[in-house]
Image: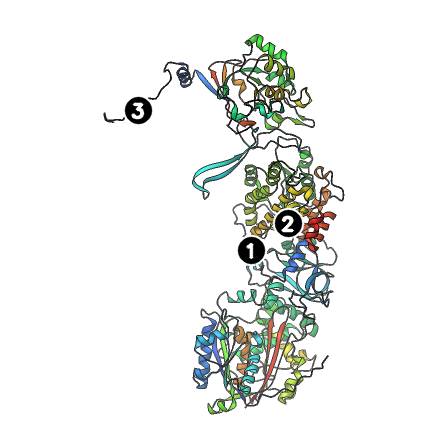
Amino acid sequence: MTSKSAKIAKTPSGNASGPLAALASALAGGAIEVIDLTQTLSPDFPTLVLPPELGQCTPFRIEEISRYDERGPAWYWNTITLSEHTGTHFDAPVHWISGRDLPHNTVDAVPAQKQVAPACVIDCSELSAKDADFLLQPAHIEAWEAEHGRIPAGSWVLMRTDWSKRDAASYANLREDGAHTPGPSPAAMRLLVEARGILGFGTETIGTDSGQAHHLDPPYPAHYILHGNGRYGLQCLANLDKLPPTGALIIAPPLKIRHGSGSPLRVLALVERGATGGKA
Amino acid sequence: MTEPLTPPKRKNPLKKTRLPLLPSGIRSRTAQMLTLVAAEGRFALPTCLDCGAVHYPPRDACPKCLSARIFAQEAPAGGRVAAETIIRTSTDPYFRERMPWRIGTVVLDAGPSIIAHLQGDVATGSRARMEWKLDKSGQAVAFALPEKETPNMADDPQLREMTLDPKFRRVLVTDARTAVGQEMVKALAAQGAAIVFAGLAEPWKPAPVRDALAAIKGVEIVPIDITDTDSVNELAGEIGAKVDILINTAEHIRPGGLMERKGVGVAREELEAGYLGLVRLAQAFGPTMRFRGADGTNSACAWVNVLSVFAQVNWPQFGAHSASQAAMLSAAQSLRAEFRAGGVRVINVFTGPLETEWYQAVPPPKVAPSQVAAATIDALKRGLEDVYVGDIAQDVRSRLAVNPKAIEREL
Amino acid sequence: MVAIHSAKRLGYEGVAVTAPVTVPYRRFSINSAHWWIGRALRGLVAASGLRPADIDGLSVSSFTLAPDTTIGLTQHYGLSPRWLDHIPMGGASGVMALRKAARAVQAGDCDIAACVAGDTNHVDSFRRTLSTFSRFAQDAVYPYGSGGPNANFALIMSNYLRKTGATREDTAKLAVAQRENAMRFPHALMKKPLTAEAYLEARAIADPIHLFDCVMPCAGAEAFLVLREDIARDLKLPFVRVLGSIERHNAFADDAIQERGGWERDLDELYGMAGVKRGAVDFIQTYDDYPVISMMQLEELGLCENGGIVEFVRGNTFTTDGTCPHNTSGGQLSVGQAGCAGGYLGLVEAIRQLTGQALGGQVKDARTGLVSGFGMITYDRGLASCAALLGKA
């Protein structure tokens, strides 16, 4: 290069020694790890099962458009079809009838600022292993808080069950009387939403609610209470066992679907190296 | 007495697969009146509506009165074999590799003499029962069978060229979750199919029938979801070269027409499980089956679509479903043309409403799933192409033939 | 209802048949039918001393002329005839062409009619001809084993043997006699003597048809001229007269299986017209696509009593110099079957025999000869039957 090399135009930039620069350096140096909390989108991944006369969750499907062939000689690409609620996905308030009239209740209206937020992880894996119908109760939350401190407002609460480690059949865990998967009790949801002011609730199972949640009062309390109060849901999460009870930062931006009720998404967690999980 | 068929030896994977050849499929348009009756397994002969004279081969004017009003009319199927020959030399490549081949002149009780293929137990001087069969070219041919069933009759090599007998063949039933699929699996196993591949989609969903089906000798449970291209392709990669008969039992039956339903979601599901499923199966399994059309005793021979008879005329109570079935019927016709070069028969089994949960509110008569399976087995053994199962299907077929507008208004 | 009586038939006075021409046969030919027919026309010109322009009538029989018919051939050969016919009728071509040409000449529609039959035989022609021979064959015969005429005639022959009590030894007798005749005929493709043993032991083609029951398809052409007797005399051409002739098609449609051709319906007229006693001929040329069909003709044309065919075959030699000379050039069985020319073979040979021009064995003092034509098996039987009695001029 000669001395005549063009000058790079200067644009306004952040403070080279500010928190983001520190984050970038921590990411580059490995002091902060990025954990992928997402299940792979595949046709084999279970979807929510409803009575067949109701509308169904469209499963993930993938069709080649071309693969270096007569349909497109030098490129490979696919068309995918899926519902807003297939695979690891985000629930917006409008998803549930209780949230249908709230402002900013669709995925395209979720403020960007809320798409990055801290998480509290409550480990229910042992209790869920013993009882597939395990329901998270206020007592479990209070016990967790006794150990890790009060759940801060505006944070995600993620319910770790290790359900994501199961094979597809025991993951869906369907029996004659429907699905048997863990989830929150109505009281727990009320506590988290009304008393703690959480941003949202996340699970490893197919829904934020338990498999038998239609028998609860209100039915589907997670959906009903979260969305009725403008909060969000995350489900089909994975790798929650790799998160510390507190201190993880969740990046969960749904696709900007006009009037969308939810969205498949890639969920990432930033974790300080060496942090470990905590039990309920 | 016919030599019983022996189970085919395992195929030498180093051996070249014999290519399918076809007998001459050239026919006059008039002669296609016999293709129609052969497709349904009826015996009819060209008959003059003016003077009643029965003739053969099919003509465009009556040889007694020159009337042009000639139709294939049901006729007595009996006859006597007046002469026979064993053809040992042929200029035609198809017959050349199937020599010797027996044919005969049969004097029909209905009048005309007819040159016919002879089943091995039929000989000069003997009485015979005539059937129209579809040969590998898909065209109608006369076949003289013994008047009464003889031992191993169906194993006659000439007859087996015309039929699609599941004996010793390997069959894929694409959806064993359906009641029809389950009955089909059981019936095929009972008919001596070498393997019945019973397809189950979404293995993560409970399938109470799985163990019962898997316990049947010769049945293998295989994963296949015909709404998922990858799944269909994967199974074809594993067993595609071993599927001699494919029976598509997938169904997605929902009531309703077009206007009252909100959105296209259900219609799309109907197409995914119906028309597009058929397309996926055709792409994944079709080319190999067509290639294997003459691959020995267990050559690929048949593709069966189980369809609602309302594929032929819309039933508004299940209007959108009827439309998806119509798409499948049209696709089946395309498939028939595409399979022709391999001599693989496409059978459409048309049923009326089934005795299943989706037709719960429909009054009888309804078709038991086992009836559909029995009719399919019968179609395979006789080599039919169009089958109407149950009173409703028969009724619709008859009414359509008389006045398609009337049935359109009445349904 | 009007009762319709046939009119009394006119004779063929003033008509001469002459110039027998054979274009030597070949098993396979790379030439077209047009080439073979052209060679035959040239042979007629050479044999008669006429110029091509003198030919004002043309009748052609061929299966392999497609997409042309006789009309296209006029331009092809530079002819300008005023009477034209196209008779692709296989084994009936010769006699049918003769009858029509004779009437045309007699009526003055033309003076000199060239009658030609010719077909080529490419390596794959035979298969193609079989598969598209007729609509009925397409619809109702070819798909049944595709055995061609062999399979059809096998059904007819098996029934015939059973009904008449004839055996393969009897059909052998005719085939062997024809081969003996052919040994002296220069154009015969079959040059090896045939014994009854060889006939009987030959490989089966379509039971009971065996190899030596079958003709060999080949390329070739045959031709003759039909013209006014005065012109023949001016040209100093030896000629024969047509004493009588008949044709009948689809004669016994209700017979379940073919046991007779159709001659018997008009036989009295044939002999009556000619003033010849039934069967009193010096030789007979039958259409021998299979020996069994020759047996059928010998009986039906009155060479023996009804029902007496087996005895008759056993009691005659059928050789040129023996009793009941039959297919004196060797017939198609030994000369070869050049498509429609096979329907001319016996007629051209008869002209030679009656004009003393035999290329092979000459029947001594031959004055009256019978030629019969048969064929066009479009479904299960030969539809065409015809015959002509020819007399030495």
- Mark 1 and mark 2: span between their CA atoms? 20 Å
Which residue extends farthest right?
B364
Horizontal and vertical percent for residue C51? 43, 84
What amino acid type is highlighted by mark number 3?
Ile
Disc 2 designates what residue? B347
Mark 2 surroundings: few (<14), some (14-19) or many (≥20) residues within 10 A: many
- Image side of residue B290 versus residue A5, left or right: right
Mark 3 surroundings: few (<14), some (14-19) or many (≥20) residues within 10 A: few
Q: Can you tell which of label 1 and label 2 is closer to the viewer?
A: 2
- Mark 1 and mark 3: span between their CA atoms? 73 Å
Q: Secondary structure at mark 3?
A: loop
Quarter of the N terminus of chain B within the rendering: bottom right
Q: Is residue B139 visible?
A: yes
Horizontal and vertical percent for residue C54? 45, 84
Disc 3 designates what residue? A8
Co-location on one chain, circles 2 and 3: no
Disc 1 designates what residue? B21
Residue occupying image coordinates x 70% and y 60%: B44
Q: Secondary structure at mark 2?
A: strand
